[in-house]
Amino acid sequence: MSIVGLVTVLLIVFLAVFAPLVAPHPKHASAFVDFANASSPPCRTYPFGTDVVGRDILSRIFFGFRFSLVMGVVVLALVVPPGVTLGLVAGYNQGTWLDTVIMRITDIFLAVPPLVLALAICSVLTPNLFNAMIAVSLMWWPWYTRLVYGLASTLRNEFFVNSAEAIGASKAHIIFREILPNCISPIFTKMSLDVGWVILIGSSLSFVGLGVQPPRPGLGTMVADGARYLPDQWWISVFPALAIVVIVLGFNLLGDGLRDMFAAEEV
Amino acid sequence: MTTDILTVADLKKYFVIGHSGILKREPITVKAVDGISFGVREGETFGLVGESGSGKSTVAYTTIGMYRPTEGSISFRGQSLFDGNKERPVAIKKEIQIVFQDPGSSLNPRRSIKQILELPLQVHRRDENRLEQIVRLLEMVELPPDYMQKYPQMLGGGEKQMVAIARALATDPSFVILDEPTSALDVSIQAKIINLLIQLQDEFHLSYLFITHDLSLMRNVASRVAIMYLGKICEVAEAAEFFRNPYHPYTRMLLSSIPVISEEEEKLKPKKIISTGEIPSPVNVPTGCSFHLRCPAKLNVCSEVDPVMVEVEGQTGLARHTVRCHLYGQTSASPSAEFTLSVVEVLRTGSVEPSDQEGGGR
Amino acid sequence: MRFEMGTSPLRQAQDIALLEIKDLHVHFDVYGGTLKVLDGVNFTVHSGQKVGLVGETGCGKTTTMKSILRILPMPPARIPRGEIYFKAQDVLKMGDGELRQVRSEGISMIFQDPTAALNPVFTIGQQLGAVVKYSMEGKKLSKKEIRERAIIPLKEVALPDPERMLDSYPIQLSGGMRQRVCIAMALVASRELLIADEPGTSLDVTIEDQILRLLHRLVEEKNVSVILITHTLGVVRETTDRVYVMYAGNMVEVADTEELFAQPLHPYTRGLMDAVPRLTGGGIADGIPGRIPDYLNPPPGCRFYPRCPQAMDICRQEKPSFYGKRSGVSDNHEVACFLYQDGGKGA
């Protein structure tokens, strides 16, 4: 099953990267109109049909993958380093005021309903992909801090950490070179599962108009565009929605596979 | 006169593990170490023996700096190891190293042997060729150089412990704490490691604080032995004297319980004192002498007053032999001299009936 | 002071063995191949005997014991050859019903770590009660009767205040008490054979001493046979009548305890005894060089060959079987070593 996930993800990445080359109608991804062919159902020229202004849905989906992947990667890149570092620092200094301060702040962020926070932030700032990413990042980092805190606070008392302290290693060395390598597996697993979630949330934001703005082919945006034409011109919303399902499922399966692989390693 | 490389003076380490009651919130304290003093001479192996809950590991962990003393002091070559809340200077950290009990968790499973041995070299800035030094360290513990690439999981327990020893010696220390270094290992591997440790001590003029619960092992490693019970030292003597002429009832009880494998060893053991009762936990330390609940030679004063350490006459009378027990001490409530002497005689000849406590066996 | 020996050799000869393991082979299928752990193990226990099984980590002692009760995980473990006779019936061929009877009334096992063997979220009473309930006699008993039955073994193992003990959780007890509870659990139904796997290893010496005395007393009173597994030679010497020495999946020597310690024959046994630190002082011998063999590719001949100071050519090629030492000592002393073939005196 995880192989299926890996293949799916690789396929999506390929499609996203080479979209201008593999998409049947690359120009449809940007401002383009062709009212003659608007709202046509799936056929040979347009395998997934066209939307209300005549743009090929299949091609737009390929380009849409770009936004999704960018969102996933960028959000994680923004979230993981600070989240993990805070968790490591709090865990290593467990019991001190530093631990308390960091973890209470984390708790506060965790207490806010994530989508609500994202919505609030997005509506204050200009709605676009970049700000959507910021919003999601702000509510995502605490999960990594929590995860790593639990691991680090246990590892902190292992003899190999005490040994490094006795030798005189710096705190930075201990946190990043002794403790962190033992946390990598759970972090990676979470990351791959998170890509799917981030994409989903990003699509949700796009769907309500706060993420990728039209005419750009964000998957969520595309679903929103076609929503009012359901159920007659169903293909306009359904295919982008399916695309979201596929990309999220792909990453979830991959994540499951990674988790199993790491678990087997430890035996 | 040789100077002491390490001096422990009235060391106490208490841990607060919780609070009792809802309103009053009395702190529940574990008195892991409750006032011990001893000195380790330059070049000797000082043995610390005791059962679980005796506090011996706490002494080790405090000396290495993992804990700060609640009271009392530890000095290295005259300099206190604990200066306010400041962290120990790196120059001192270099001198005092430790080998832990569990080889499985003392080596980071995510770091290669090379990385593990490199750390002490990096910290203490030995600027020569690091690779060469690592090879030399591995040779020192009789491991082949290609072990550098391996990870701890690929090594057996004994080999992991060798790496831990090499790591401890990488900083070129003068004092090494060995906390039950071979307890988790089979006897044939233990032999190899102990002989290695003795050889290294000779070669590098090291002083050892050797901690174990295995008395037979202690007999062959230590030059002086101290026995601990519930956070306090009961008896200290030179090794041969300690085993041939034990005074404290606890020492005798422990010595009489050790399983040995030859007749001549049997003859050396004190007469059997059947150990009764459970080892009390360091949370509920009995009043008076902490051993009185299990002591076959208990006197009335033992449940009231905690004895102090006094010097006694050894058979091999070179070093001081000290004991902390009312049978040999001067207390105001001491029984008559004859009674004391007769109890001591009883202990020596070993015809002691266990008191009416729960106990299995005959 | 030592415990007296329980059985006379004459009695041994007359009884059918209570437990007899014949040529047991156990293999484990793992990713890299097959681990041929047990390579023809022979092991006998008579009624009322205390038999010690000595060997170092990885020699297969626990695997052997688990095979007796058939609690090995069956993949990856396989038993390609061998029989285990308990009261003349082959355990390996038993059906479920017969096996359950063996496990609940015939043989029980006390594991090495009492903390891990007890479930932390149930009281002692609940756990003992469960053993009573699922024993063959326990099916029709009421709750009150079960509780009464459960107290009996607690008293037998000399635990203080058994009533209160029933309502305590394992975490409230000390290590020695927990081990005694495990022994009590093993005694609930009347048993004939007790397998004690390193019962004192995680305990202090004084408490271990108490536990071993307890086992000894129980053997005397109830005529239970005991297999004591340990890697501590001193414990074996004080507590058993007969000792098997095991190395890398084979029994290499067996003798009456007193004789084994007076005259160890197999080079491995000798190496082991030399390595034990003596109370008389004098330093420690060098130990045994090398490591235990890789079970994926064990040596074709004698498995101790690579580490043996007295190895000969034949040792590399063939596996020795048990040879009795006919000259001198006793017929009960057997050793699997070519040095003693044909009644030779070894080196």
Image: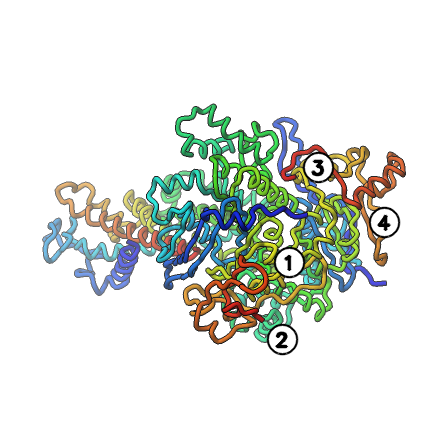
**Could one spot residue C56 in this view of the protein?**
no
Quickly name the residue at label 2.
Answer: B128
Q: Are marks 2 and 4 in contact (CB under 8 Å)?
A: no
**In the rendered structure, which disc, 3 or 2, sits on the residue that comes first in sequence?**
2
Q: Which mark is residue B285?
A: 3
- On screen, residue B174 versus residue C55, left or right, reads right
Q: Secondary structure at mark 3?
A: loop
Q: Secondary structure at mark 1?
A: helix
Label 4 sits on what residue type? Answer: Val
Quickly name the residue at label 4.
Answer: B312
Q: Are marks 3 and 1 in contact (CB under 8 Å)?
A: no
**In the rendered structure, which disc, 2 or 4, sits on the residue that comes first in sequence?**
2
Which quadrant of the figure contains the N terminus of chain B?
bottom right
Quickly name the residue at label 1.
Answer: A166
- On screen, residue C187 versus residue B15, left or right, reads left
Residue C237: image x %, image y %? 61, 53
Other-residue count near label 2 (Cα within 10 Å), few / some / many at <14 / 14–19 / ≥20: few
Q: Residue at coordinates 57% horizontally, 30% vertically from top-left?
A: C162
In front: label 3 or label 2: 3
